[in-house]
């Protein structure tokens, strides 16, 4: 089947859905907090597009960056600036517009406003003034990284979002010790020029067996999602010069339980002993995880302990 040929009903289906969305309730005097693509222009939702089209003005973190997105989608709504340096004044101006019965859309450069991006102060001011706030969800680097890593489970869907680590080494190490002590995966952002230092600090704080997922350039052409023990972090980074470029989401997996936890299985220990005769720690734990269904990070720690013993 030619994958480049669209089904004949695709256009009709799109038109039907677009008509249904257009017919939904779009109240005036409302702030629409709209998530925008984190890289792939195709990720703008149909409801988000309608919200941007219907708004009287779009409050944007960077009007130039937002104009590029809006032009691509044929949205000609006027823009106003609403960034962290003018957020108080922008919040007041937005409330004045809402008092006049206008619809205002709030966007950041990429992803969800007010989530590790400017916007929370505007939302609080609008709510305090008694106006409605409607979130229009969509692309999120945090959720995309969690989806691509498989780090959570139905039984334990918990995770913690920590944002950006501090830039100074001492503060970053203290910050990592606090967050990585939580009994859940910890999601954080990092910039390219600090990635190597943060990987080194994670290794010092969490040890070589702790699993880390690195999600790079999510939804973009050179997207990469890799999971490895922290002991292999420096080698992973050095293996490709391009890995020090782009935008990064890091997920420190929850610390593995000890050998006496509920996942303990004597048969897994016997399997690990046999595998370690010919395989590396990483490969042995990977194979054992596939055979037993147990957590790979638990098995890696168990294999490390048995090898050291």
Image: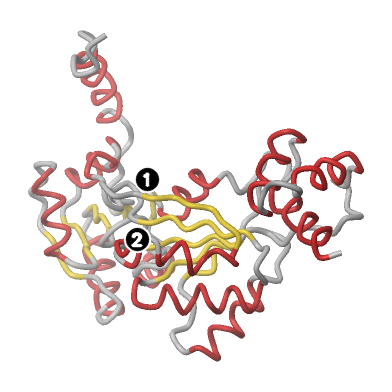
From the viewer's perspective, is residue 197 above or below residue 233? Answer: below
Between 222 and 50, the one nearer to me in the picture: 222
On residue 138, the disc is 1
The residue sitting at 92% across, 43% down in the picture is 266
Whole-percent x and y of residue 274? 80, 43
Kindly report which numbered mark, 1 or 2, lies closer to the viewer in this rendering. Answer: 2
Q: Which mark is residue 210?
A: none
Dividing the picture into quadrants, the one containing residue 309 is bottom right
Image x and y of residue 69, in percent: 16, 51
Q: Is residue 31 above or below residue 207?
A: above
Residue 214 lies left or right of residue 289; in this view the side is left
Q: Position of residue 227 (x, y in %)?
A: 54, 53
Q: Check disc 2 and report its element: helix, strand or loop.
A: loop
Q: Earlier in the sequence, mark 1 or mark 2?
A: 1
* Residue at image point 25% right, 62% down: 109
Q: Quadrant of residue 80?
A: bottom left
Q: Residues within 10 Å of mark 2 (few under 14, many from 20)?
A: few
Q: Decide: marks 1, 2 in contact (CB < 8 A)?
A: no
Q: Residue at x 34, y 70 (%)?
A: 118
Which residue matches tag 2? 240
Tell me which residue sits at (40%, 78%) in the image.
194
Q: Is residue 300 left or right of residue 174?
A: right
Q: Nearer the viewer, residue 143 or 245?
A: 245
Front residue of this view, candidates 289 and 26: 289
Q: Is residue 145 above or below residue 165?
A: above
- Count neighbours of disc 1 (C-alpha within 10 A) and say few if under 14, some if 14 to 19, many if 20 or more: some
**SS at mark 1 in the image:** loop
Mark 1 to mark 2 CA distance (whole Å)? 31 Å
């Amino acid at each position: 089947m030619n994958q480049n040929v669209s089904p004949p009903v695709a256009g009709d289906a799109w038109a039907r859905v677009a008509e249904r969305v257009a017919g939904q309730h779009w109240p005036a005097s409302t702030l629409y907090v709209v998530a925008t693509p984190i890289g792939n222009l195709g990720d703008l939702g149909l409801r988000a597009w309608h919200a941007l089209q219907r708004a009287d003005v779009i409050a944007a973190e960077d009007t130039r960056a937002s104009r590029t997105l809006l032009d691509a989608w044929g949205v000609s709504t006027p823009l106003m600036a609403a960034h962290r340096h003018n957020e108080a004044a922008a919040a007041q101006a937005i409330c004045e517009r809402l008092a006049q019965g206008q619809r205002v859309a709030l966007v950041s450069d990429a992803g969800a406003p007010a989530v590790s991006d400017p916007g929370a102060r505007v939302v609080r001011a609008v709510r305090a003034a008694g106006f409605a706030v409607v979130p229009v969800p969509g692309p999120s680097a945090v959720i995309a990284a969690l989806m691509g890593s498989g780090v959570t489970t139905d039984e334990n869907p918990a995770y913690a979002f920590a944002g950006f680590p501090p830039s100074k080494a001492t503060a970053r190490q203290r910050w990592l010790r606090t967050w990585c002590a939580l009994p859940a995966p910890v999601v954080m952002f990092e910039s390219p020029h600090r990635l190597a230092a943060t990987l080194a600090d994670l290794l010092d704080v969490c040890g070589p067996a702790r699993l880390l997922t690195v999600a790079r350039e999510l939804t973009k052409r050179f997207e990469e999602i890799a999971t490895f023990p922290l002991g292999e972090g420096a080698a992973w980074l050095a293996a490709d010069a391009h890995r020090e470029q782009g935008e990064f989401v890091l997920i420190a997996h929850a610390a593995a339980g000890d050998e006496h936890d509920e996942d303990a299985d004597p048969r897994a220990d016997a399997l690990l002993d046999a595998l370690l005769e010919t395989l590396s720690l990483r490969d042995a734990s990977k194979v054992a995880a596939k055979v037993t269904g147990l957590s790979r990070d638990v098995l890696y720690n168990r294999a490390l302990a048995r090898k050291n013993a």
